[in-house]
Amino acid sequence: MFQECMDNVRKTTPLVHNITNYVTVNDVANILLACGGSPIMSDEPEDVVEITSICGGLNINIGTLNKRSIEAMYAAGRRANELGHMLLLDPVGAGASSLRTNTAVGLMDELKFNVIRGNISEIKTLANGSGTTKGVDADVADAVTEENLDQMVDFAKSFSEKSGSIVAITGAIDLVADKDRCFVIRNGRPEMGKITGTGCQLSGMMTAFLVANPDHQLEAAAAAVCCMGLAGEIGYSRLQEGEGNSTYRNRIIDAVYHMDGTTLEQGAKYELR
């Protein structure tokens, strides 16, 4: 299943429009190239409608908001919906400020997203309409754990039904759910949290997986999460003495670059609930 999802990305080279944050824009572009996709970045309102028209998917990331980029998000999102393109929302830091929260909620109200991907604090904020996060990181009190896993699976399914979108909650344990099914994924390394932008990279890559697998969107989203987590495991195993988070970032991108569908299928750690 996951093998086919990844192989389809390699075969089709999906073009993904990213309105993403300037902290991680280069890494998002490189992870898309590594997985077999093709990135294009534009957040100028006069440009985005044309740009998103030639792509197959749009990744909206609210990590570094400004009035111009917010205008661009709505314009590009409306065009993506008109064309039936894949549309993903990454509500970075929702709950940290009213602007971020209101922008994410407003985008959800106006646009139809195929996937909403964030950490548990961000997703809870969107579900409740308000909340708190530790900057752009999840609040420790919100963590998905083995102890609260059943409750969190139910929450993910419920929010998916309410929002009409697949919900991907990433953390130590990842959840990827629609209203009926939830992939519980245990790939990854805790050290990935020391790298800025692994979530942003995942959102870009996930959009490519969705574009390449339109008839199996839940599986495609879960495959992307497993791919990123497995790359974190492989990249960490290749770190040498004296290397740190900067090298680790590159090792992860390299691991995605060299990964094929068979490696992903064999290395994915998940259960379906």
Image (cartoon, rainbow, N blue to C red):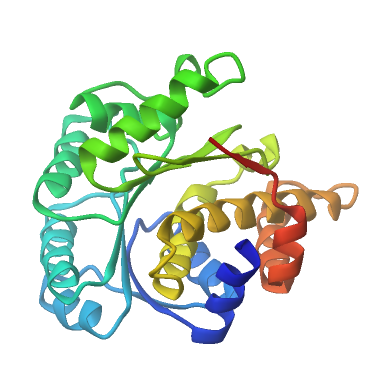
- In this view of the protein, can residue 210 be seen by the observer? yes
In the picture, measured across the screen, residue 111 lies left or right of residue 16, that is left
Q: Nearer the viewer, residue 148 or 105?
A: 148
Q: Is residue 63 above or below residue 41?
A: above
- The residue positioned 9% from the left and 51% from the top of the image is 110
- The residue positioned 32% from the left and 77% from the top of the image is 56
- The residue positioned 70% from the left and 61% from the top of the image is 264
Q: Nearer the viewer, residue 178 or 34?
A: 178
Q: How many marks?
A: 0
Q: Nearer the viewer, residue 108 or 61?
A: 108
In the picture, measured across the screen, residue 107 lies left or right of residue 224, that is left
User: Residue 136 at x, y = what percent?
Assistant: 40, 35
Question: In which quadrant of the rendered view does residue 162 lie?
Answer: top left
Q: Nearer the viewer, residue 241 or 198?
A: 198
- The residue positioned 68% from the left and 61% from the top of the image is 250
Q: Residue furthest right?
A: 241
Quadrant location, the N terminus: bottom right
- In this view of the protein, can residue 135 be seen by the observer? no
User: Residue 64 at x, y = what percent?
Assistant: 30, 49
User: Residue 165 at x, y = what percent?
Assistant: 28, 48
